Amino acid sequence: RKRSHQLGAMAFSASTVLAVCAPQSYFIASLGVAAAIVFANLGAAYGTAKAGAGIATMGIMRGDMVMRSLIPVVMAGVLGIYGLITAVIINGKLDKPDTLSAYTAYALLGAGLCVGMSSAAAGYAIGIVGDIGARCNALAKMAT
């Protein structure tokens, strides 16, 4: 009698509930793949567009300095590659959907969101700094 009571308590402990393979675990982990690549590429696209606008303005003011201002565009493009690499790594862990626990699925979702959202924020920052930096660089060279 005491043994069956212990087994019942063990079956519903928090660690074993998360170890049970829920049917939505594969979907949740796949959301991590999508979040990594979508948000990282949104940040890369915004950073490239915003820094590109600054480079275009610089090209009007000082055409000889355009090649020096391409660094923010390259940095923003690398953010999309970070998201792609993370998505491939997370997707590689989804080879056995029947053994994917809820804990692992939420961990993969968190990893995808972490990389994706940080790349989106970095792309936003790179775009603003690249735009203003290119314009200020052109204005400073015109003043001298």
Image (cartoon, rainbow, N blue to C red):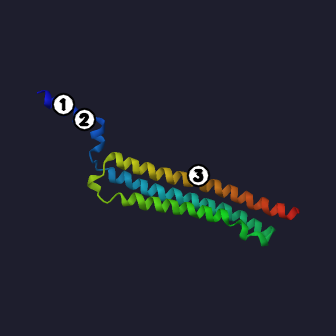
Q: Is residue 110 left or right of residue 15?
A: right
Q: Secondary structure at mark 2?
A: loop
Between marks 1 and 2, how big is the CA–CA gap? 10 Å
Q: Nearer the viewer, mark 1 or mark 2?
A: 1
Tell me which numbered mark, 1 or 2, is placed earlier along the sequence. Answer: 1
Q: Secondary structure at mark 1?
A: helix
> Residue at left 42%, top 50%?
109
Number of labels in the image equals 3
Residue farthest left in this picture: 1
Q: Secondary structure at mark 3?
A: helix
Residue type of the residue flagged with mark 3: Ala
Specify the label residue 113 is tagged with: none
Residue 4 rendering spot, x and y as whole percentages? 14, 31
Query: Which residue is under mark 1?
Result: 6
Between marks 2 and 3, how big is the CA–CA gap? 40 Å
Query: Which residue is under mark 3?
Result: 121
Quarter of the view holding residue 57? bottom right
Residue type of the residue flagged with mark 2: Phe
Query: Which residue is under mark 2?
Result: 12
- Residues marked 2 and 3 touching at CB (< 8 Å): no
Q: Is residue 1 left or right of residue 101?
A: left
Sort mark 3 into few (<14), some (14-19) or many (20+) by Cα contacts within 10 Å: some
